Amino acid sequence: MSASFATAALGRSFTLDPASGELELVPAPAAASRHAALADHLRASPKLACVTAASRLELRPVPELVLTGVADFDALTGGLPRGCLTEICGPASSGRTSLLLAALSAATRRQEVCALVDAGDSLDPQGAAASGVDWNKLLWVRCASTSRRAAGKTASDPWEQRMEQVLKTTDLLLQSNGFGLIAIDLSDIPLNSARRIPLTSWFRFRRAVEHTPTVLLVVEQQPIAGSCSSLLVNLAASGKLPDLQQAPVCPSHARLLQVLHATVEVQRSRLERKPSQSTRMEFYSRPAWAG
Amino acid sequence: MPFACIFVPDFPVEAIVRAEPELRSQAVVVLSGKAPLEKVCALNERARRMGLEIGMTKTQLEACTGVAMRARSPLQEAAAHAALLDCAQSFSPQVEDTAADTVVLDVAGLEPLFGALPKIARDVARRASELGLETNVAVAPNPDAAALAARGFSGVTVIAPGIEAERLGELPVSVLWDGLSPRLSPHEKDDEDDAEKFLDTFQRWGVRNLRALAALPGIPLSERLGQKGLRLQQLARGSSSRTLKLVQPPLLFEEAIELEYPVVLLEPLAFALNRMLEQLCARLSSRALATQELCLRLELETDLCPEDSAAPAPALPRCFTRTLRLPVPMLDAKVFLKLLQLDLKAHPPGAPILKILLAAEPSRPRAAQAGLFVPAFPEPEKLELTLARISGIVGEGRAGTAGLLDTHRPEAFRIEHFAPQEQSTPTLSEPRGNSGNGTAHSSPITALRLFRPPLHAEVTLREGKPTRLLCPKRKDIAGEIVWMAGPWRSSGDWWEQDGWARDEWDIAMNRENSFVLYRLVHDLLSGRWMVEGAYD
């Protein structure tokens, strides 16, 4: 009995003779014929016939990227991938909602129908309109914990019912097809409650949105979808006060909230090869009255 | 000039069977009259084979097994008649509403559209079958010959010009009055006594069929039976001629079912609704129409209703009405059924159901052509179902689009039904806020995340300005105010009962080596301080 080893780099194969313990060098053409024989053997075996060699697996197509309309963000990430799950996480006043509204605004400008599942019911419709969101193209789902109370049931965790509504609603929206962007706003959900969403739900969402032109965007405090997200972006407040450039003696009625600085960092991206280190960039948002 | 006649044999039975198709394979009798004196007024062929006949009492029928007995339903007969007219109208606009069970239409000139006359007759029968009616269809050169042939021959009959007398001659003389003689000649209505008198006379003369009647000499017949006799002979020869009395049936699409027993659960109700919706959709489809509004009216049992039992007139039925308005014209019975089910689940009738009436408001079907460069769009039918399901999850009025009101009052919006309009070509117009074609780059607008309801805050003031903040409900919103801008004063509706006036402050507070920006509001009317939201 002998064992064979082949190496493409050398263009030779080696055969180990167990009796003598010597290696026998076999020329490459013979190795090729053995490979062919092995392939024939695999094809002949009914159990192995359906096995595809790893080298012949189809490459996953690179998803199309859509721009959010925020120059710095788009320059850093390339945009939001279609048919993928994207997570944007960060604390309060880090620009998450501003980015979300910018993405919705850009999508509705492209005449795409969008949906926002608002777990905390915290969207300001006037502010959304000021951001350029076309309300004729946006479905706003306001989750609340009132219907179950009306039905005479009580929930141990007030957020539990909202989370249930978020999951069911997102499932329905993904099944109905045709949406350009589906956003789930979990920013107000406490981290403990948000982490109770089973990973299987995120896998289900990822599978449902795959091969569709829909962008699935989740806004939250901390990453919760694990490896299901194709793009994970972390936002943080820059730590600068809004008008440090203004004179400190300036009276409050003469001040104006003009700019909100934030930093954005790509923590994970499956769209291309993993970056050697995370990249960070600053961007800012401005209130509607700042012009 | 060919005419087609559509005749529904045993029309009261067909009207019942149309609503309950499972009865088609059974012996069915229809009873009319007040209990306990109901008598059979119509029956189908299977019941006839069992020896049953018109005029039998309910007590006599109870001796027979396997007979389905139903009360006569004028509502269902009206719906069946409307369906019959729709069937005729789907082929020709020149339709005569001859009787409840008979419709005559002019089929001249339809060959280039629908094919040869036999094919037209078959298509008419098939269309009627789709509408739930089993009919006899006959095509003949004149309306009366067509009507006689439809009454006398089952299935599809086509009589070529010139052989009317030969084909009609096989029919018995009784076919002239077989419940239809007044309808054959609307201008010369014979009463039942006349019919019996003529039949007795023909019986005595040995005239059994139309061939024998047609062969009688005209003048002696006129001397003995008068002009009516001659008219009957013309009918028997198939040589009568008259113009159709055309009708333009109104576009009313209503279906009704009177239930034998009160229905309590939604599941059996769904079965009945499904049948009615299928019939409605078939009728609308036959007229090349769709619907944008469905109205469901349920008559409820009053006994189980406490408020009605206390009412002075408990005999009046209580109605429960639900209207389903659709954003676009649709014609899908399954979608309608699901929408009605979801609506009834959210708004249950509250009492057993006795009668179901369903009406559809007709509208032109939508015409849409997708473009190559138009983004994907949810199917309207699917979107309606999704919206209805989501409303069932999050509650009514919590899913839709925000309609902004023309006021500066905070939270001035209302939730409206989400019905995006599909565009065939990409638009170049831009909403306010940003410019460009969807790829324009600019800094985003700072968003405000609202707290609903606003959080009550305890504020420490120094020289009229807030310096410290504490929210009893949110322990994380507490501490020194490190930056502020404002106040921005606004007010409105002071001429109304619910006027408002407030001062707004933008404040920053420390949190974990960073800052969080809030909007602090001082209600000038109540004097309360509230945190309205956080900038994010």
Image (cartoon, coloured by chain):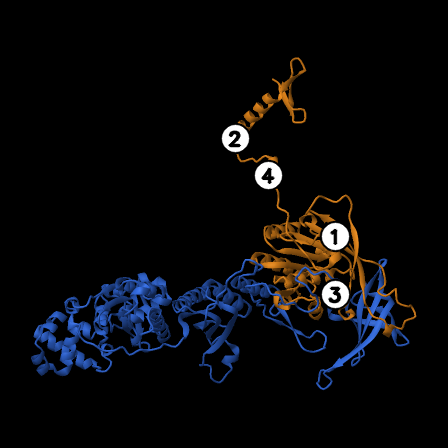
Chain colours: A orange, B blue
- What residue does disc 3 label? B445
Q: Is residue B440 left or right of residue B511?
A: left
CB-based contact (under 8 Å), mark 3 and mark 1: no
| Residue at point 41%, 73% (across, down) | B254
What subunit carries mark 3?
B
Left or right of A1: which side holds B262?
left
- Mark 3 to mark 4 CA distance (whole Å): 45 Å
Label 2 or label 4, whichever comes before in sequence order: 2
**Can you name the residue that lies furthest to the top here?**
A20
| Type of the residue with mark 2 | Arg
Q: Dot 3 surroundings within 10 Å: few (below 14), some, or many (20 or more)?
A: many
Q: Nearer the viewer, mark 1 or mark 2?
A: 1
Q: Which residue is mark 1?
A: A76
Q: Earlier in the sequence, mark 1 or mark 4?
A: 4
Report the front residue among A8 and B522.
Answer: A8
Q: Nearer the viewer, mark 2 or mark 4?
A: 4
Decide: marks 2, 3 in contact (CB < 8 A)?
A: no
